[in-house]
Amino acid sequence: MNEAKLFSHFPEIQSDELVLSKITALDLNDMYDLCSNETLYKYSSSSAKKNKAVVYNMITQFDRDFNHKKAIYWGIYQKNAHQKMIGLIELFDFNKSVDMVTIGYMLNESYWGKGYATRAVHLALDFLFCTADINRVQALIVSENIKSKRVLLRNRFTYEGTVRQGMYWDGIGIVNIDIFSILKKEYVV
């Protein structure tokens, strides 16, 4: 794991269509649209946010987590849409001993079904494997979240198994969690 590539400055990644970049206070309205949508939190370990002050505090916490080398939160932006944030990707639980990170993502419901989540995860994987020298990327998905599983499978993640009734998630209760992963040697650009 190349910690300098991860945390020396906030990484920005671009494709022809998308940008993964730092979420700032300028994104508050887009972030609130995302975080206040109950549908998006149906399979999340936290609950939808009820006011913008809470979302603003989340954005400032993203900075603190990055500065403490604990997490990276990227906004997913459409490149030619005046910095419209359409979703987010989070990288957390960095494990230096095995060069591993856990990935999570969320996309504004208006952009579902268009391949944005799949392409954004691919951009993140490209950075993690080719620039940051990560060896393993994993995702933990509530078993019923079929759409999220499809994003992972399109990115060549491997289903490793289900932790039955192994986690408690706010707003849901005890859940089954499916574990997916991809290794650097399995990644195809």
Image (spheres, rainbow, N blue to C red):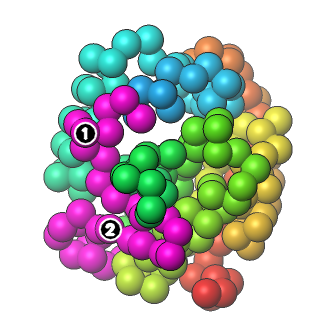
Magenta region: which residues? 1-30
Mark identifier at residue 141: none
Q: Which amino acid does label 1 sit on?
A: Leu
> In which quadrant of the rendered view does residue 42 lie?
top right
Q: Measure how far apart labels 1 and 2 are at the Cα level.
A: 17 Å
* Total count of labels: 2
Where residue 51 sits: x, y (%)?
A: 37, 13
Task: Determine whether the residue tagged by mark 2 lies in a helix, strand or loop.
Answer: loop
Residue 78 horizontal side relative to residue 7, left or right: right
Image: 154 above or below 146: below
Residue 10 horizontal side relative to residue 171, left or right: left
Residue for point 27% across, 17% down: 53
In front: mark 1 or mark 2? 1
Residue 8 horizontal side relative to residue 177, left or right: left
Kindly tell me whether residue 137 is visible in this rendering: no
Residue for point 70% across, 70% down: 155
Residue at far top of view: 50
Image: 67 above or below 35: below
**Residue assigned mark 2:** 12
Q: Which amino acid does label 2 sit on?
A: Glu
Image: 33 above or below 21: above
Mark identifier at residue 26: 1
Residue for point 31% across, 47% down: 23
